[in-house]
Amino acid sequence: MFTKTLIGILAVGGLTSPALAGSKAQLIEMSVTDKGFEPAAVEVKKGKPVTLVITRKTDATCAKEIVIDEHKVHTKLPLNRPVKVTFTPKKSGELKYGCAMDKMIGGVLKIE
């Protein structure tokens, strides 16, 4: 009974647990801090949807949005509010992401 209630709460709240999502989704929680995007390098699987949940925790950097050119992502990151960005990587390799200022602050998604 408890498990069904917990799953119901997660579904209604729009939260995704990696354990519940199985192999269909890849959920990556990230933060924007004084150091930039953390973690800066993340491994994901090709052909499976990726959801980045990004919370900007500082105003001290230019990373007030995330840009992933290859997937036409250009999403604002309001302070202290998690933002979901979902896309499906189609090819292996490194996918660079970062701030709108020519990705001065950014990182790499390593796609296998």
Image (spheres, helix red, strand yellow):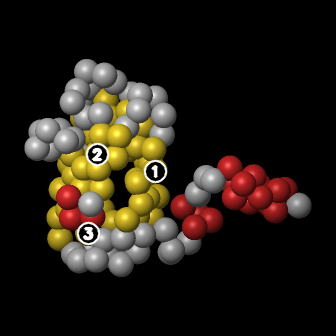
Residue 33, percent across and down?
31, 29
Q: Amino acid at mark 3?
A: Ile
Which residue is under mark 2? 66
Residue 28, percent across and down?
42, 54
Residue 100, percent across and down?
19, 42
Residue that extends furthest to the right in the rendered view of this protein: 1
Residue under the image location 21 percent in, 46 percent down: 98
Label placed on residue 6: none
Residue 5 or 11: which is nearer the viewer?
11
Asked whether, in this view, residue 54 is left or right of residue 3, the answer is left
Label placed on residue 84: 1
The correct choice, above or below, for 73 with respect to 81 in the image is below
- Give residue 73's quadrant in the image: bottom left
Tell me how far mark 3 sits from mark 2, CA to CA.
18 Å
User: Mark 1 against mark 3, which lies toward the viewer?
Assistant: 1
Which residue is under mark 3? 111
Element type where label 2 sits in the image: strand
Residue under the image location 58 percent in, 57 percent down: 16
Residue under the image location 74 percent in, 60 percent down: 7
Element type where label 1 sits in the image: strand
- The quarter of the rendered structure image containing the C terminus is bottom left
The crowding category of the residue bearing disc 2, from other C-alpha atoms within 10 Å (few below 14, some 14 to 19, many at least 20), is many
Tell me how far mark 1 sits from mark 3, CA to CA.
19 Å
Residue 110 appears in the rendering: no
The correct choice, above or below, for 23 with respect to 102 in the image is below
- Give residue 108's quadrant in the image: bottom left
Element type where label 3 sits in the image: strand
User: Mark 3 against mark 2, which lies toward the viewer?
Assistant: 2
Residue 84 or 27: which is nearer the viewer?
84
Q: Is the C-beta separation of discs 1 and 3 under 8 Å?
A: no
The correct choice, above or below, for 26 with respect to 112 in the image is above
Residue 28 or 102: which is nearer the viewer?
102
